[in-house]
Image: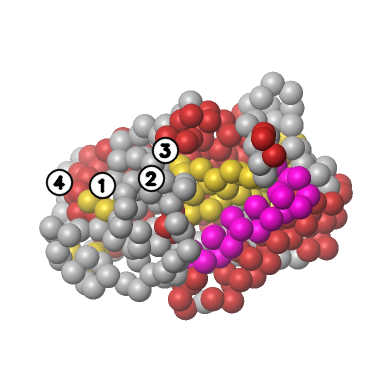
Amino acid sequence: MNERKVFFVTGAAGFVGYYLSKKLLDQGNIVVGIDNVNDYYDVKLKETRLSQLEPYGNFTFIKADIADKERLMNLFAEYKPSIVVNLAAQAGVRYSIENPDVYMQSNVIGFYNILEACRHYPVDHLIYASSSSVYGANKKVPFEESDFVDNPVSLYASTKKSNELMAHTYSHLYNIPATGLRFFTVYGPMGRPDMAYFGFTNKFFNNEPIQIFNNGDFDNDLYRDFTYIDDIVEGIERLASHAPTGDNGEVKHKVFNIGNNNPEKLMTFIETLEKCIGKSLGKEVAFQKQFEPIKPGDVPATYASTEQLQQAVGFKPQTTIEEGLQQFTDWYVEYYGLKS
């Protein structure tokens, strides 16, 4: 990407949005970041991320909600983005059981507004976040993009599946080049505090036990494809200049997995996290553990096939959980001033 492009990044104060914006700005692109900076998790963390983007002269931040259609349309009219990356969404499987309204508002209405804006102010490429949760409780692994995904087990997963359907329709009707990315458990420094690895670390430092939702069944432990933030960002950045072309009369809409293609047992992940916290602190640590039943909406395994991504842009996530978690715990100890 040599020429300066205008990127419109929604969810710019979020975990993936922040890192993507930073990388695009470092490359000299113009980034217009949008976020409603809601309090789903610690707003201070969102403000810290934004404060690191503000010094860039080619960054503009707008506090707005993608569910506000009129405001969104005006922003598209004003900034005329060439590439839109929609990362604004209400995240979290368990939270969707308690608060379904916000999921419909942000993930369905908000995404519809993005599609409408791309229709009225045509863009070179719309990239949007989907999720590995669309695979539901599929038993066949690794998950491939061609797999049947009509049995979501959470409302969150339903909203992400509906995003893929809506994008396909808008691409078909209005020729919008669109790419959906099914993210697999993204983690790393400055990540989301509602994610397990962050919550486990909080609990350790608060001297509380961690809850592990696998019934203590180590033979049938949960598996997760943990994907480090830098790998996610590189995948998005490479795909940005690879808009679907709609060859052979196809719709200009593609969906890719972005995952580590290397699922880890949850217990292995937890043991690695213990070791990494220990290294960051310079002493041995151990979590207090409580085993509980699997929660509704959780799936037993996530495992990404990344062949299609590799074929499209020659990239496959590589970061090991040892490397990635060490980066996270070093940041955590520093950020919260816990170094003794």
| The label number, if any, that marks residue 284 in the structure image | 4
Q: Nearer the viewer, residue 221 or 18?
A: 221
Mark 3 — residue?
Answer: 306
Q: Earlier in the sequence, mark 1 or mark 3?
A: 1
Q: Is residue 329 visible?
A: no
What residue is drawn where x is 61% and y is 49%?
128
What residue is drawn where x is 48% and y is 63%?
150
Residue 176 highlighted magenta (yes or no): yes
Q: Is residue 296 left or right of residue 6?
A: left
The answer to whether the residues at label 3 and label 2 have Cβ atoms under 8 Å apart is yes
Q: Earlier in the sequence, mark 1 or mark 4?
A: 1
The boundaries of the magenta stretch are 156-177
Check disc 1: other Cα within 10 Å, few if <14, some if 14-19, many if 20+.
Answer: many
| The label number, if any, that marks residue 224 in the structure image | none
Mark 2 — residue?
Answer: 304
Q: Secondary structure at mark 2?
A: loop
Residue 115, picture quadrant: bottom right
Q: Earlier in the sequence, mark 2 or mark 1?
A: 1
Q: Nearer the viewer, residue 245 or 54?
A: 245
* Amino acid, disc 2: Ala
Tag nearer the camera, 2 or 1: 2
* Amino acid, disc 1: Glu
- Residue situated furthest front in the rendering: 248
Check disc 3: other Cα within 10 Å, few if <14, some if 14-19, many if 20+.
Answer: many
* Amino acid, disc 3: Thr
Q: Earlier in the sequence, mark 3 or mark 4?
A: 4
Disc 3 to disc 2, C-alpha distance: 6 Å
